[in-house]
């Protein structure tokens, strides 16, 4: 199948590109390289360094005529969205509309969209189900939610199929230290350099951590399953920062000193997503335990 991946040089996008190529699909990557890295790109993929808002993107659709679009390119960090909400909406909403218009014009069949738990805001119940109220507490969460609505609208207006995947906190090889899942990348860097770990707050607030390889497998499933579905991609397991540190140090067999700092302003205290619908609609379930995923991540990134 002929597939276009926006953000395919990024952390999650590059893993999706890899699994698509492993399954014999023809893949074109579009990435501005603002946050993506050229070394992440699979050498078997075609690559274009283009911003998703650019008029040049039409040339790529014209040349490559993708049947499926995986849309991951985004302004994906909360603090910059607060500092510059205009840029956030321009990338996340304007960029998505540009892609949808080109899909309509060049008759692409389906968009598989990477969304976020940030659209839910502060949970009113746990684990969070897909019908949970959409009440984001940042421009980033709002822009991801608005992009979802545009995708649904383009199905109603033009028949473009979609699967929307709302991710929990993803971690794994190639991750940078940005975002919620980035705490694992930070901790691993500290461990490799024999430095102490700092936990903001008392370490009791929880997150739902999902291994990037499992996320890539969910995206592969979405090629054949999940028509017009909106599903959480998660483990459903709430893990505190204290538990994360304990699991990480056991998994990599490293001793570590832990310090506790000030709680960060605006942090959601507890967050986990219910993945039940992904099992029903995508025929997908996560495979890697947190300990297994942490060990793979540590060993992959370990200095030689």
Image (tube, grey):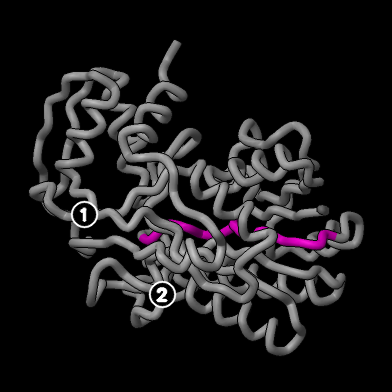
Taking depth in this image into account, of 55 and 104 the one nearest to the observer is 104
User: Which residue is pictured at 78% across the width and 41% down the height?
Assistant: 24
On the image, which quarter does residue 92 sit in? bottom right
- Residue on which the image places disc 1: 206
Q: Are marks 2 and 1 in contact (CB under 8 Å)?
A: no
Element assignment for label 2:
loop
Helix, strand or loop at mark 1: strand
Q: Residues within 10 Å of mark 1 (few under 14, many from 20)?
A: some
Residue 83 makes an appearance in the image: no
Q: Give residue 179's position: percent from left, percent from top.
A: 38, 51
Whichever of labels 2 and 1 marks the residue nearer the N terminus, that label is: 2
Q: Position of residue 300 (x, y in %)?
A: 46, 24
Please count the marks in the image.
Answer: 2
Q: Residue 130 bears which disc, if any?
A: 2
Q: Nearer the viewer, residue 66 or 61?
A: 66
User: CA–CA distance between discs 2 and 1?
Assistant: 19 Å
Residue under the image location 78 percent in, 70 percent down: 109
* Residue 247 in sight: yes
Q: Quadrant location of the C terminus?
A: top left
Q: Position of residue 28 (x, y in %)?
A: 78, 48
Instruction: Give the residue drawn at x 63%, y 73%.
Output: 94
Q: Position of residue 93 (x, y in %)?
A: 58, 73
- Region of the chain picked out in magenta, as a range: 66-78
Report the residue that reaches farthest toward the top: 304
């Amino acid at each position: 199948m002929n597939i276009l991946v926006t953000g395919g040089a990024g952390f999650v996008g590059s893993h999706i590109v890899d699994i698509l190529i492993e399954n014999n699909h023809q893949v074109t990557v579009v990435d501005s390289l603002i946050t993506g890295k050229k070394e992440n790109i699979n050498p078997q993929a075609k690559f274009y360094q283009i911003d998703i808002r650019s008029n040049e993107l039409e040339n790529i659709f014209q040349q490559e005529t993708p049947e499926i679009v995986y849309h991951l390119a985004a302004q994906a960090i909360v603090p910059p969205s607060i500092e510059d909400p205009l840029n956030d909406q321009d990338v996340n909403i304007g960029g998505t509309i540009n892609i949808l218009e080109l899909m309509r014009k060049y008759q692409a069949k389906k968009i598989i969209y990477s969304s976020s738990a940030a659209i839910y805001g502060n949970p009113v119940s746990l684990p969070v189900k897909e019908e949970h109220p959409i009440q984001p507490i940042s421009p980033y969460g709002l822009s991801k939610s608005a992009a979802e609505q545009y995708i649904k609208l383009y199905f109603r207006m033009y028949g473009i199929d979609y699967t929307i995947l709302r991710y929990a906190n993803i971690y794994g090889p190639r991750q940078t230290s940005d975002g919620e899942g980035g705490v694992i990348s930070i901790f691993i860097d500290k461990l490799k350099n024999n430095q102490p770990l700092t936990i903001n707050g008392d370490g009791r607030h929880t997150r739902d951590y999902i291994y990037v390889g499992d996320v890539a497998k969910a995206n592969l499933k979405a090629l054949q399953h999940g028509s017009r579905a909106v599903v959480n991609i998660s483990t459903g397991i709430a893990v505190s920062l204290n538990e994360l540190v304990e699991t990480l140090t056991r998994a990599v067999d490293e001793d570590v000193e832990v310090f506790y700092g000030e709680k960060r302003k605006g942090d959601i205290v507890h967050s986990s997503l219910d993945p039940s619908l992904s099992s029903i609609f995508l025929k997908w379930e996560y495979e890697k335990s947190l300990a297994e995923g942490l060990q793979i991540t540590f060993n992959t990134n370990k200095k030689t």
